[in-house]
Amino acid sequence: MRMKLVSSSPYQKESQKKKRNILRKRIFIFVVLFLVVFATLAFLSHSNRLNIKAIEVSGNVVTDSRVIEDTVSKEITGSYLWFFPKANFLIYPKNDIENKLANEFKILKDISVSLKGVNTLAVNYTEREGKYTWCGDILPLSLDTTEKCYFMDDGGYVFGEAPYFSGDVYLKFYGEEKKDSDTMLGSYYFPDVFQKLLSFRNAVKDIGIKTSSFFVRPDQVVELYLSSNIPFPDKPKIVFKSDSDVDKITENLQTALSTEPLQTNFNKKFSSLVYIDLRYGNKVYYKFK
């Protein structure tokens, strides 16, 4: 069966043409209105009354506030889409500023950026306190070696280069987990076991033994070196596994140190102690030169 094509009537063609014209007019009006609104907002966004003029920094003790101000100032310089200034109080890059400060100044923590009125940006933070030092992934082989160490806070976060200290001013940590970054700055020192190491060190201190440094070996064996003028790696040390139960190995150490002949040798021949090994359950091994 053949279908007969029926041509549109002149009325239908005229009606379709009118609809297309109406649609074009509506699109044109919408575009014009959009551009007018966009231009108006862009113009108003540059008003001094709506833009940040001052930066207030609080919480700094060590960090130079002017450096922080300069960093923040750079983050609010420029515009979005070439029209809207980043300094506008409604659209300033709050998250970008906080991330920038956290990445560039590892000493800072609890960073908070907020508006103080319309024209002032308040930057608040606290600074990490150096409690310990991280001094590399290998032990120095001489007392004369000048180490490059970095401060760590009480959570094991490595945040800044430390000056040279002679003696055991800070408890030192050695060793490094495998990671993608080529620096420990901004990283945590063995976060899974760090607090455990501190707990054991405190327990050893309560027994009356002074300690100077930790070394976490690649095989996850921990060496706690005792305070001594003997250089690494011959300093007397206590050896244990990183996954050991702190209470258990502390109990084993106390028991061993109260048992002869270790008790007498430890007190009278301490300088010749090589190690006390707590890796083998209730069996404690030790060696003197």
Image (cartoon, rainbow, N blue to C red):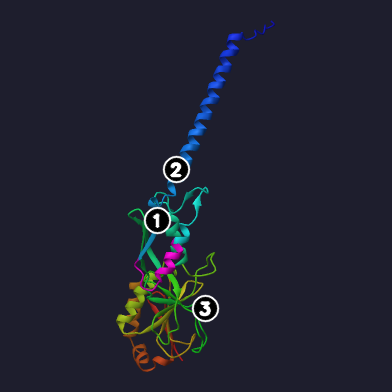
Q: What residue lies at 37% left-to-right and 88% top-to-bottom?
A: 262
Q: Callout 2 environment at 10 Å: few (<14), some (14 to 19), or many (20+)?
A: few
Check the image and report above or below for 84 versus 171: above
- Nearer mark to the viewer, of 2 and 3: 2
Q: Which contiguous range is marked in magenta?
A: 58-72
Residue position for label 1: 52
Say whether marks 2 and 1 touch (CB < 8 Å): no
Q: Residue furthest left?
A: 206
Residue position for label 3: 138
- Does the magenta run of residues contain 43? no
Query: Which disc number belongs to residue 41?
Result: 2
Q: Disc 3 versus disc 1: distance between alpha carbons?
A: 49 Å
Please state the horizontal and vertical placement of residue 201, each as a whole percent of the image: 36, 77
- Does the magenta run of residues contain 71? yes
Tag 3: amino acid: Ile
Q: Helix, strand, or loop for circle 1?
A: loop
Q: Callout 1 environment at 10 Å: few (<14), some (14 to 19), or many (20+)?
A: many
Q: Disc 2 versus disc 1: distance between alpha carbons?
A: 17 Å
Please state the horizontal and vertical placement of residue 247, each as a whole percent of the image: 33, 72
